[in-house]
Image: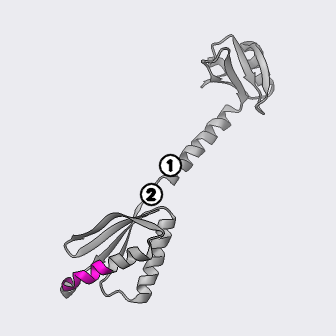
Amino acid sequence: MDVNDEIKTRKMRVIGTDGEQIGVMKRKEALHLAQEKEMDLVEVAPNANPSVCRIMDYGKFKYEQKKKQKKNRKKNKTQLKEIQFGPKTEEHDYNFKMDHIERFLKKGHRVKVGIYFKGREMAYIDQGEEMLRDIYDDLKDKATIQKDIEKQGRLMFMIIAPK
């Protein structure tokens, strides 16, 4: 976008601060009109015939654009959260951790749900797999499986994402 003195066209269609059409005028007249209002003359459509310029506060416009970009960057940032269970997790702990998983999913984060086996618990791998299936069944309406159950050493996990 060209601002004030960078505009090269001789005639232009000028749009006011409220979006109203002021009309077609020469560059000097448009610059003078913008200076009277203590604003900038910004060329918004240089390829139009005649080119279109708008009277606006260019500094404020740039500030608003940066603010929107920053907000969009923050929105799109999703994280992978991790919740760990044991194969013998009691009901209260299970419900407490499920609340955390639901909160993470509402915020748009993916969740890695893992079950860690210690010592002789390795003999009960089937219970761990059953527990992961139960967790997914409880979250069916809120989540989808992004990565199905996988085992790595003493860890069995799955990754779920919000619907």
- Numbered tag placed on residue 73 in the rendering: 1
Query: Which three-letter amino acid code belongs to the residue tagged 1?
Result: Arg
Tell which circle, 2 or 1, labels the residue nearer the N-terminal end: 1
Quadrant in the rendering for residue 151: bottom left
Picture residue at 44% right of the left edge, 73% below the top:
139
- Element assignment for label 1: helix
Q: Does residue 126 belong to the magenta stretch?
A: yes
Question: Which region of the structure is painted magenta?
Answer: 122-130
Residue 110: % across, % down: 41, 63
Between 163 and 14, the residue placed more toward the observer is 163
Query: Residue drawn at (61%, 19%), measured in percent from left and top?
Result: 46
Q: Quadrant of the N terminus?
A: top right
Given the image, on which type of amino acid does mark 2 rest?
Answer: Thr
Q: Mark 1 Cα within 10 Å, few/some/many (few <14, many 20+)?
A: few
- Check if mark 2's residue and mark 1's residue have beta carbons within 8 Å: no
Label 2 sits on a secondary structure element that is: loop
Query: Residue tagged by mark 2?
Result: 78
